[in-house]
Amino acid sequence: MIGVLLLALVGVWLVVNFVQGPSRFLSVVIIGLTNGSVYALIALGYTLVYGILQLINFAHGDVFALGGLLSTTLILDLFEVDSSSATASVALAIGGCLLVAVAFAAVLNTTVELVGYRRLRNAPRLAPLITAVGMSFILQNVGLYFWGPEYTVVDPLISNDPAFSIGEVEVQWDNLLVILLTIPLLLGLTWLVTSTKQGKAMRATSQDRMASAMVGINVNRTISFTFALAGGLAGAAGLIYVLQFTTIRFDQGFQLGLIAFTAAVLGGIGNLAGAVAGALLIGFVEAFNEGLSWLSPGSDWTRSIVFAILIAVLVFRPEGILGERTPEGA
Amino acid sequence: MSEQLATLKSRWAEQPEVVRRYALPAGAIVLAVLYPFYVDLLPGFPVTSIAVVMLVFTMMALGLNIVVGYAGLLDLGYVAFYAAGAYIAAWLASLHFEDISFHFGAVGVADDAPGIHISVWLVLIIAGLFTTVVGILIGLPTLRLRGDYLAIVTLGFGEIIPQFVRNADEAGIGFDLTHGTFGINPIDSIGFGETLGAVGLPDVYRTSSSRAELFYWTALALLLFTVFCSIRLRDSRLGRAWIAIREDETAAAAMGVPLMRTKTWSYAMGAFFGGIAGAFYAVYKSGAFPADFYFQFSVFLLCMVILGGMGSVWGVIVGALILSWLDRAGLAELGKEFGDLVGREIDVPKYAFGIYGGIIVVMMLVRPTGLIPESRHKIEMEEGVHDTPLYDVQHEGPGTGRIRGDG
Amino acid sequence: MADDLLVAERVRKEFGGLVATNDIDFAIPRGSIVALIGPNGAGKTTFFNMLTGVYTPTSGRILFDGEEIAGKPPHAIVERGIGRTFQNIRLFQQMTAMENVLVGMHSRLSAGIVGSILGLPRVKREESGANERARELLVYCGLPKRHEHLAGSLPYGDQRRLEVARALATDPKLLLLDEPTAGMNPQETADFTSFVRRIRDEKDLTVLLIEHDMKVVMGVSERITVLEYGEKIAEGTPAEIRANERVIEAYLGRGAAA
């Protein structure tokens, strides 16, 4: 099968690159992990909302961007920390920003659902989708209005210094922080979805909205809660992105959102573990493409490659890596 | 006053059907044809050169209407068709391919000029056909996907193709296909040439003193052609099949409508008109520039269709004229007036897409059938829902269009 | 058997681990009215869906008029002569009754893109002929004044009739009716039952219906096949089925007493 052959070729390419520069390869892997973590947080939002409403929330990426933009304002104007600040104030700033960004994005996402999608819940499938596109543009322009068309820059608050090394490979503090921030969020999410009442309500509503309503689940509240959760994750992702990359712009949400959505589909839309797995994979794809030196297409081609992956998955294996095949016609 | 209105109304109803059906459209066409002559009398109305662009965008919106409005396929990558048409015009009617010299019916070009120079009239047709092929190719992977996935994938195409034309030069792909970010210009002019020029028809538009008017009337002719085709298609066997697919594609298939084939036809038709419009626009601007092709443009066209009325030819025309006017002139003017009112300077055109997004959201929430709904919707809104059933409907019942489990 | 319009041999459908239909053998004699019954989840609609191309059988053959149709797409099966109605009405809500029926004729008409745009005389003739036939079908199915009415605005009973009109427009040899009398009151049900017989007789059709209403089943079918948990547990005339213990057991006494 062509698929197996392609994967084999990719495998060969990876091996050659590894052999040619193992430490470089490993640092690229770490970059992949870092990028993948940010994508994971955004992808989870897409998959949560898709699971419960069968809606691709186009505006989700823009919630992420607004969360990031807000974080820059907090860092620059409220906490006023920069690269010379003491570690304690930086830690305080990050903590504060996290809380505010998450809360803001959660509220924003919930509002978007309430205003834009709730009335269209029983409309033909096309309607909320079109509305989501409109919402996305509105949010982008909000970002444009308040933060302008240029990149907003913050000082690198986390140093590039290596936190520790594995042999020759350095793991820098900023990469480490991304991973360290992401893991508790993922664990928290898992706990929430599997062990709490709200989480069970979410899962039930994803499976069968009418039946859930009939057993007494408040569907509207559950959906709002899902959007809040998704939004919160996106807000956190926005902050983490700003910490890692130090700049953000109003229109980056849409781009990154698309990549994150591809990740969600790759892993299996509706499947939380799949979203994370897909996101890490896409993170690796991006990092390998831009970081490896032997026969690498380069950053101009990243978007095309990701897009090609999206098409391939949707055409050949729409349920993704971890998803389940649904019966045809169902 | 209302008495006079009532008399007018009854007088109108008495007219033979032919009059009633064709009077309004005929009047509109006459008004449109004469527009360049009286536009100066109307302050605030777009000048002829802007009107040309409005007509081109309207044609594209009608093309998109066939895909989104008739067949119900959310195509977010229509800009790809626009780009395809424009670059065909650029390849076949300019100095771009300087290693070849091929002339065929071109006007206003020196006989020894390098490059391919085919008569622009022919190029328009070729652009339409070429873009149709592009549409069919894009359709192959995308049309078997479900509605929301189709939207995302077409969105992807809408992003990739502009990126491609920006990079398809020596540095990017090894040979100069699109001349990268510079684009290809100039493009030959449209015209009727010397022989017909002798009879009084304009020989070369671009050198004529009534350049804007000539382009305007040609654009109008192309638009009327698109309108004609749209209406004919809507009322045909294929049009019914499209609307059936839009309503319920599983039921449509169960009634004998071949899904892939029929959907591909809608793409093909949408692409056809998009390609012609794109080629014409490139000729008008005398260039194909990557800066013109950006993903948001597809959403701009979508907004026209939503505002006007999905599936409604008149509605889409109205929606397109309004939005293209806003885009070219309206937003700037409104921005100034609003700024004067509020006492602050607001660069409204900067937020154009936020406004278009807002229009989309508001329309979907408040009036999803559009300003001028498709005639079917109108019947429903006037007639209302008939007798309610006397007993509970056991299953999902009419009007939800949802798929229920089987067995 | 000699003149079976449809023959299904060992037709099996699995969804992941679930076996919806388990090697079913089933034949429909030409010109007959056959009913497929069974408790919910027995696999009846799954079987229907395999006949109409919505599902592909995991294994087995389905021969329609001698030709293998298993796995063919729905529209190809309609072209070959199988028409159907749906369990939960799936009319084109925003289209008029007339247009719904015209869509049913899609595979029997041939106007193409160019012909439609140019308005060729051939296309015009085809359209007016089609309109004529559609009007006749609507009258035949008891909807004489409804053609310009939107399907979504019709009363429930009329919608059911429209579904049948639309299915008949596909010019089928075999008509599949999926729970056609669901939601009807006794009078409407009786009317519909005689209507089914009339269609079979006058239009020279074969009819297969899924039904839960035993009055209809016993009243109109010439042969009944009973499914339970994806297997055929009985087959025979109404009298035989009424007396069949396994069937009675499967329904827990329901229906047979109706």
Image: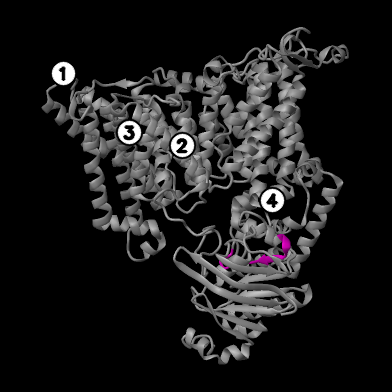
In the picture of the structure, the residue carrying the numbered disc 3 is A32
Figure quadrant of the N terminus of chain B? top right
Q: Report which residue position mark 1 lands on.
A: A84
Residue B73, percent across and down?
58, 44
Is circle 3 on the same chain as circle 4?
A: no
Question: Do marks 1 and 2 both belong to one polypeptide chain?
Answer: yes
Q: Residue at x 48, y 26 (%)?
A: B352
B195 vs A30, left or right, is: right
Same chain check for tags 2 and 4: no
Q: Chain of mark 2?
A: A
Q: CA distance from mark 1 to mark 4?
A: 68 Å
Front label number (1 vs 2): 2
Q: Amino acid at mark 4?
A: Arg
Q: Amino acid at mark 2?
A: Leu
CA distance for labels 2 and 4: 47 Å
Q: Is residue B384 left or right of residue A259?
A: right
Residue A289: x percent and y percent?
40, 29
Secondary structure beneath dot 1 equals loop
Q: Quadrant of residue B89?
A: top right
Report the side of A175 relative to A218 (left or right). Answer: left
Which quadrant would residue C166 be assigned to in this image?
bottom right
The mark total stands at 4
Report in which chain the residue with disc 1 lies: A
Determine the residue positioned at 78% across, 74% down. Answer: C204
Closer-to-camera residue (A171/B129): A171
- Say which residue label 4 marks: B240
* Residue stretch rendered in magenta on the structure: C79-89
Residues under numbered marks 2 and 4 in contact, where contact means CB atoms less than 8 Å apart: no
Of the two numbered discs 3 and 2 on the same chain, state the one appearing first in sequence: 2
